[in-house]
Image (cartoon, rainbow, N blue to C red):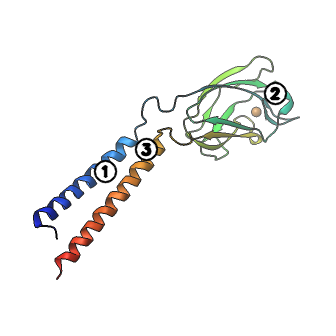
Amino acid sequence: MFSRVTRTSIVVVGLMVLAVAPATLFAGATPSPGSSPAAARSITLYGSYQNPAGWGWTPSNISNSLTLTVNKGDVITFHLYANDSMSHQLLIDLDNSHSNTTGDSWSPMFSNKTTAKDWQYTASTAGTFAFFCNVHGYAAQHGTLVVQAPSGGGGTTTDMTTLAIGGIVIVVAIVAIVAAVMLRRKRP
Ligand SMILES: [Cu+2]
């Protein structure tokens, strides 16, 4: 049905689209400026080693089951108090290893019950992470930090990558169908 020239141009266009698709994927991996504005967030935390042990927003809700929820990109200023006047250090356990390992972030030491030690942390990775006291360890003092990824229409890195991969899958499928049709027509 197609002339030889038409077939050749279909193949050429198909190959060109395939060559351009990975570039689109790469472009999609670059966050577009201003797509997810970082919010400034203030979180007060009281650390305590025992009676009670753990972390709390106030001296009266200290436990080892506190969950903090923020959004990806939020710049958090932690206001850190030591409810028992002992030295503590807040560690965000980005690999959930429950120990201080490469890539984790931690605050300066703090030991004052009435004057906060401020520490800024940018929640740049979405996910659920443990946090714990770097002085007294995970078992003694821990909690959970949930960093939520933006939901839908945010033009985030993940969304763009997913779209690009979807586009490539569709292009490959179209090229495969065209090729199959052409191969079938070649044989009498
Ligand atoms: Cu501690």
Apparent side of residue 152 relative to residue 13 in the rendered image (left or right): right
Q: Are marks 1 and 3 in contact (CB under 8 Å)?
A: no
* Secondary element at image label 2: loop
Q: Is residue 180 above or below residue 129?
A: below
- Observer-nearest of 71 and 134: 71
Quarter of the image with the N terminus in it: bottom left
- Observer-nearest of 167 and 55: 167
Q: Position of residue 64 (x, y in %)?
A: 79, 40
Characterize the local packing of mark 1: few (<14), some (14-19) or many (20 or more) Cα atoms within 10 angstroms.
some
- Observer-nearest of 151 and 5: 5
**Residue beneath the point at 37% across and 58% down:** 169
Q: Alpha carbon of mark 3 to alpha carbon of mark 2: how far?
A: 40 Å
Q: Nearer the viewer, mark 3 or mark 2?
A: 3
- Check disc 1 and report the residue beneath it: 21
Q: Position of residue 111 (x, y in %)?
A: 76, 23
* Secondary element at image label 1: helix
**Residue beneath the point at 26% across and 53% down:** 17
Q: Quadrant of residue 40?
A: top right
Apparent side of residue 30 relative to residue 105 in the rendered image (left or right): left
- Check disc 3 and report the residue beneath it: 160
* Secondary element at image label 3: helix
Tag 1: residue type? Ala
Q: Looking at the image, is mark 1 or mark 3 earlier in the sequence?
A: 1
Q: Alpha carbon of mark 1 to alpha carbon of mark 2: how far?
A: 52 Å
Q: Is residue 105 above or below residue 41?
A: below
Q: Quadrant of residue 151?
A: top right
